[in-house]
Image (cartoon, rainbow, N blue to C red):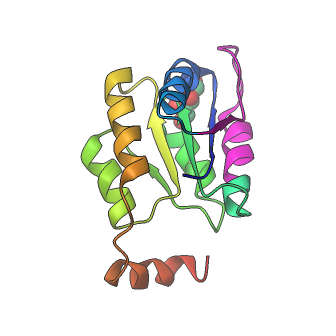
Amino acid sequence: MPPLAIGCDHAGYELKEIVKKYLISLDLQVDDLGTDSEKSVDYPDFGSRVAEKVDCGEYKSAILICGTGIGMSMVANRFSGVRAALCNDLFSAIMSRRHNDANILVMGGRVIGSELAKEIVGAWIKTPFEGGRHSQRLKKFCGGK
Ligand code: RB5
């Protein structure tokens, strides 16, 4: 699997560290784009840092974490080549890959626990896009990207 990028704000920092270790334990390469502590930062800075690298194709997929996941998903979805899915449950995470070909998984560090987050990440990275009728639907709002 190609390397993943990961990013967070201060409210997502603790969970980001846990998710990063989990990905490494699966022998995946994960590039941490910050933030690197619980010191208060602005989520748009880190959300856009990650999203722009997915948008330009430097990374095929990425993970973003803030307090709720809401701010990070709003920021990431401003980039035309990004399909960021806020998934704080397992079913949404699986469906975001199968039907929406999500390329950024967003979670809320203040919403879910670390065990659920690891389950979500594990399922998200291994679930393929189904294509077919879902490709046609994506083309209606993503164009060629
Ligand atoms: C930070 O306090 C919090 O607002 C942020 O992490 C996020 O939840 C925004 O949507």
- Whether residue 76 is visible, yes or no, is yes
| Residue that appears at 64% across and 14% down | 38
144 part of magenta stretch? no
Instruction: Choose top left, top right, bottom left or bottom right for residue 80.
Output: bottom right
x and y, in percent, of residue 143 in the image: 58, 82
x and y, in percent, of residue 132 in the image: 34, 83
Query: Is 132 placed left or right of 71 in the picture?
Result: left
Examine the rendered structure and indicate whether residue 113 appears above or below residue 1.
above
Front one among 116 and 85: 116
The furthest residue to the front: 27
Instruction: Choose top left, top right, bottom left or bottom right for residue 44.
Output: top right
Examine the rendered structure and indicate whether residue 77 appears above or below residue 88.
below
| Residue that appears at 64% across and 59% down | 78
Front one among 26 and 137: 26
**Ligand 1 in which quarter:** top right
The quadrant of the rendering that contains the C terminus is bottom right
- Whether residue 113 is visible, yes or no, is no
| Residue that appears at 48% across and 38% down | 69
Instruction: Choose top left, top right, bottom left or bottom right for residue 47.
Output: top right
x and y, in percent, of residue 15 in the image: 50, 23
Front one among 49 and 128: 128
Looking at the rendering, the stretch of residues picked out in magenta corresponds to 29-52
| Residue that appears at 72% across and 35% down | 33
Query: Is 25 placed left or right of 97 in the picture?
Result: right
x and y, in percent, of residue 135 in the image: 42, 80
Query: Is 131 placed left or right of 30 in the picture?
Result: left
